[in-house]
Image (cartoon, rainbow, N blue to C red):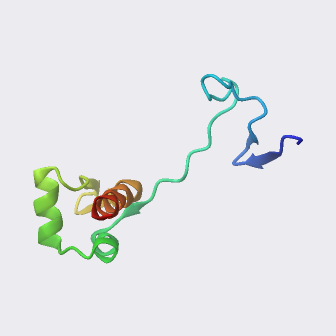
Amino acid sequence: MRPMRMAVAHHTIDSGAHLDPVKGATPQNEMPVMPPLKLLRFSAVHERTGLSRSTIWRLEHRGQFPKHRPISTNAVAWVEGEVAAWIQAKVDVAL
C-alpha cells in the first residue's frame, strides 16, 4: 500500500511511511498538526455539562473541574478539550 500525503495548514503530513516504529514520532523536520483550541464561555459549558454556575465554580475551586481562564478584563472561558475530557471521565466512571 502506498503512503498517502496531504497538505494541511501549510505542512505536509505523511500517513505513517516515515514514522519511527520504535518511538512512533515524526521526523524533526515535520511539525505535528494539533487540533485548534476553542474557548467556551459559561453558557456553552452549562449547555454541555448541565451544571449551574455555582456548581461549576464550586467544583472548580475544589479541583474537580477544569479551571477557567481570563480572556479579557471582565470575561472568563474554559478550554473545550479540558471540559470534554472532564465529561468523558464522568461517562467512563458511570460505565
- Give left or right: position of 16 versus 64: right
Quarter of the figure that contains the N terminus: top right
From the top left corner, tell me how far across and down residue 48 is, in percent.
34, 73
Residue at 32% from the left image edge and 56% from the top image edge: 89
Task: Pick whichever, 95 or 65, lies toward us.
Answer: 95
From the top left corner, tell me how far across and down residue 45 is, in percent.
31, 69
Give the tally of numbered discs: 0
Task: Pick whichever, 89 or 47, lies toward us.
Answer: 89
Task: Pick whichever, 82 or 69, lies toward us.
Answer: 82
Quarter of the figure that contains the C terminus: bottom left
From the top left corner, tell me how far across and down residue 71 is, in percent.
31, 56
* Quadrant in which residue 56 is drawn: bottom left
Q: Residue furthest right?
A: 2
* Quadrant in which residue 88 is drawn: bottom left
Residue at 53% from the left image edge and 53% from the top image edge: 36
Q: Residue furthest front?
A: 95
* Quadrant in which residue 13 is drawn: top right
From the top left corner, tell me how far across and down residue 19 is, in percent.
70, 29
Q: Is residue 40 above or below residue 25?
A: below
Task: Pick whichever, 28 or 92, lies toward us.
Answer: 92
Residue at 55% from the left image edge and 51% from the top image edge: 35
Residue at 23% from the left image edge and 52% from the top image edge: 67
Q: Is residue 80 above or below residue 44?
A: above
